Image: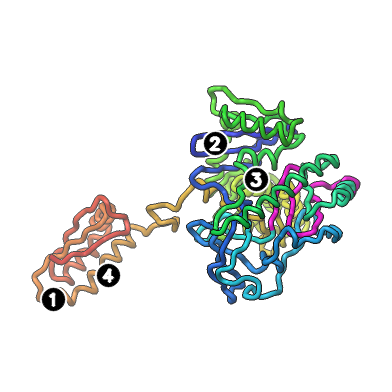
Amino acid sequence: MSAEILINVRPQETRVAYVDGGILTDLKIERKTSPTLVGSIHRGTVIRVLPGMQAAFVDIGLEKAAFLYVGDIREDVDDNFLSAVDREEPLDEGDDDKPLSHANKTPIQDLVKEGQSILVQVSKDPLGTKGARLTTHLSLPGRFVVFLPTVRHLGISRRIEDEGERERLRKLVQKINPSGGVIVRTAGDGASEEMLKADIEYLDRLSKEIFKNYEKKKTPGTLHTELDVELRALRDLMSEDVTSVWVDDVEIHKKVVKFVSQFMPKYKQNIVLYEEKKPLFDLYDIDIEISRSMERKIWLKSGGYIVIDEAEALVVIDVNTGKFVGKKDLEDTILKTNLEAVRETAHQLRVRNCGGIIIIDFIDMEKESHREKVLEALAEELARDRARTNIVSMSQLGLVEMTRKRIRPSLIKTLCEPCSYCEGKGYIKRKSTVANEIFRELERDADMLINKKTNVVIHCHSEVVDWIYEVEGESLEGIEKKLGRSVAFKIEPNYHLEQYEIFFV
């Protein structure tokens, strides 16, 4: 099935959509006010070491200190990283496209000290209240490979499934004998020795340039930044399946053509300047799909629906039959709803870029064969996901635990902010609740008002006043009798529904 890449450019925002068979399967949005930091390399200064958490806070020149966990620190962090790797050592083959485990048994207080300068790379953008996450294990992505200057590791993308091709790529990389580790990317499938060598040599030169800049720079700050979102998307997403890359901005089109001509010349003819009046994203109703993916409830074609709730480190997805009543029996209805929910869930995770721990509450299935069918369908759908996923299990209650690698903020975090009215809670108090809070506070003040000639005036929202007069008239009379005086209300147009003040005048 043919795919297309759409690059929509605005002065303050660039959006890149990957459309496969007319369906949005990947979306990247980057704003000039908040560009991603992932992949950027910095000279950092350790400002605080926390032995109790086995972590350190590092100043990398940003407003908020970044976070460095002990497992992300090299044992030889003090060494020149270009001399830390012994080129004579054989490349150590690990788990496919994942570098060797960095489990560090040395306590963090023995690895870094406060005031120490270190070379670090951002592995995760700041999320919520957390600063950026760092690593000292550098990785530099190219077109065909990811270069690892600090380890001797050889990995092949898990998406390259042909064993003969995997063996060919292993032998080519070993023959090139790079000065660091190499992970061959999916785009490296079928690449020649010359292509791989050119990519590795370019990234090797880049790593040496980064270290020279680190030596020159004496204060915390940036040494290397990743490509802009449109070039990054082409580097990561461009393949034989992509028939066209549409760009709706003249200057960015020139920039993309230059980049593709240099690194992917065979795709140069696929780059097209979009000059129609109709907005580029309207070709495939992408804005409608984005709006749909910001909803809490997503309807399925059958009439069922899923509800998606995002917390800071957890995503919960609830599956419901909704209007779908089925045709045969209950178990068949439940299975069909769950299978349809699997497809929509995998799609939403990709478009929304949800990550961390994900719990999916499927409708409970009595038959073990149905549970296995749902799990198999979920694994099959997630296999298309470019982010690393891991399905843990399905409980007897139909709960599936899984994880999805989170690097950047989700679509909701990127495009939305907490509601200014409910302050992100997602709910506000009922008018009856606020009214009863007012009555209870007046009851507490009853003793204080005995023998005092004061009037009671309550400043509050108009809807609360209306509720009290329409529904709580009897309660108001009881309070006035207890206080021995009448209660007056003053409507405040600018007050929050939950806000009120009691004045004694």
Q: Residues within 10 Å of mark 3 (few under 14, many from 20)?
A: many
**Residue 241 lies in what quarter of the image?**
top right
Q: Is residue 500 left or right of residue 242?
A: left
How far apart marks 4 and 1 lie (CA) works out to 17 Å
How far apart marks 3 and 2 lie (CA) works out to 16 Å
Q: Residues within 10 Å of mark 4 (few under 14, many from 20)?
A: few
Residue at the location (21% across, 64% down)?
502
Q: Is residue 460 left or right of residue 63?
A: left
Task: Please tell me the numbered disc located at residue 65.
Answer: none
Instruction: Say which quadrant the C terminus sits in.
Output: bottom left
Q: Amino acid at mark 4?
A: Arg
Q: 441 or 171: which is nearer to us?
A: 171
Residue depth check, mark 2 versus mark 4: number of the one nearer the observer = 2
How far apart marks 3 and 4 lie (CA) works out to 50 Å
Q: Amino acid at mark 3?
A: His
Instruction: Say which quadrant the N terminus sits in.
Output: top right
Which portion, as a residue range, is magenta?
138-167
Task: Please tell me the numbered disc located at residue 347.
Answer: 3
**Element marked by disc 2:** helix
The residue identified by callout 1 is: 450
Q: Earlier in the sequence, mark 4 or mark 1?
A: 4
How far apart marks 1 and 3 lie (CA) works out to 66 Å
**Element marked by disc 4:** helix
Is the residue 361 above or below the residue 263 in the image?
A: below
The residue identified by callout 4 is: 440
The residue identified by callout 2 is: 287
Q: 401 or 442: which is nearer to us?
A: 401
